[in-house]
Amino acid sequence: MSKKEFLKPDLSIEQLSEELVITNLKLQQANQQLQQEQQARNEMFSNISHDLRAPVTAIKNSIALLSALDDYDSNTVQPIVHLMEQRVNTLEKMINDIFFLVSAENNFLSIHPEEIPLGFFLEDYFFSQEADCKYDDRHLHLALAEYFPYTLTIDPHQLQRILDNLFTNAWKYSKSGDSITLGAFCKDDTIFIYVEDTGIGIADAHLPNIFKRSYVVDSARTPGVSSTGLGLSITKALVELFDGTISCTSTLGLGSRFTIAFPLPQS
């Protein structure tokens, strides 16, 4: 039997070396991205751990105090129960946020889009926020045309969650006497919905990162409010789920404006 003829490689040594260099660079980039994602996860869980400790400690101390009481006078017990209720609500929100992110990442998030009259929906939402005692020391405004005939195909529960996150964010980064405005308008076949506040604003250095998971401006933490940095990340994920985009403009010391853009349904 004759020996098989040696087959020369299709690429020269120089070309093979170049391919190896390119492949090595791609591997380095992939490894760097994995490290960044791991760091983001570590930061997220670090923030979550930090924010879970406070309500858990408050609940444990409240239970200990109740257990030590000989006489359960309502004037003594009621403030403790109220504190426990607040902290439990905080825990529940953080757990729901974590569950949402896991659901979104694994593509088993349940959504039920329907066509909704946007003007009526935003009005109802605004009046529900006016009735919320959390905003008693804020000035709420609705910037919406009296006749707003546009519809949007979206899951109304998820749209409410988007607005809840933005309103809570506006409250968190504002102070007593500041204003929070909910507005909407249509331009170039696009629906724009915005939440604007006259609060502390966001520094330019932070703006590119505010929608990243676990990113928190530490100096603006509010006691009793989940500050794990999941709220805006969840909001962005929900907006993009319905083919929308979200952006933020802000001036430090003057306030911020979060704007959502949804394409109008095709006729």
Image (cartoon, rainbow, N blue to C red):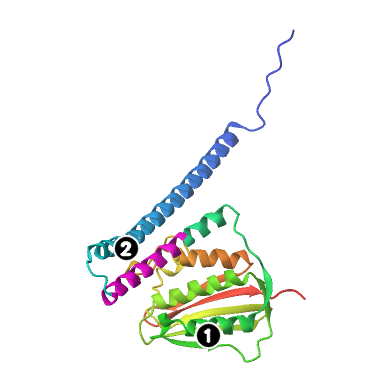
On whether residue 86 falls in the magenta region, the answer is yes
Q: Judge by depth and name the residue closer to the eye, 182 or 55.
A: 55
Q: Residue at x 47, y 84 (%)?
A: 131
Q: Which numbered tag is attached to residue 59?
A: 2
The Cα–Cα distance between marks 2 and 1, rounded to whole angstroms, is 32 Å
On whether residue 195 falls in the magenta region, the answer is no
Considering the image in quadrants, where does the N terminus appear? top right
The mark closer to the camera, 2 or 1, is 2
Pinpoint residue 177: horizontal percent, then vertical percent.
Answer: 37, 87
Left or right side of 246 for 52: left
Quadrant of residue 243 in the image?
bottom right
Residue interval drawn in magenta: 74-95
Q: Residue at x 51, y 42 (%)?
A: 27
| Mark 1 closeness class: few <14, some 14–19, many ≥20 residues within 10 Å | few
Q: Residue at x 77, y 76 (%)?
A: 267
Pinpoint residue 108: horizontal percent, then vertical percent.
Answer: 60, 55
Magenta: main secondary structure equals helix
Quadrant of residue 118 in the image?
bottom right
Pinpoint residue 49: horizontal percent, then vertical percent.
Answer: 36, 56
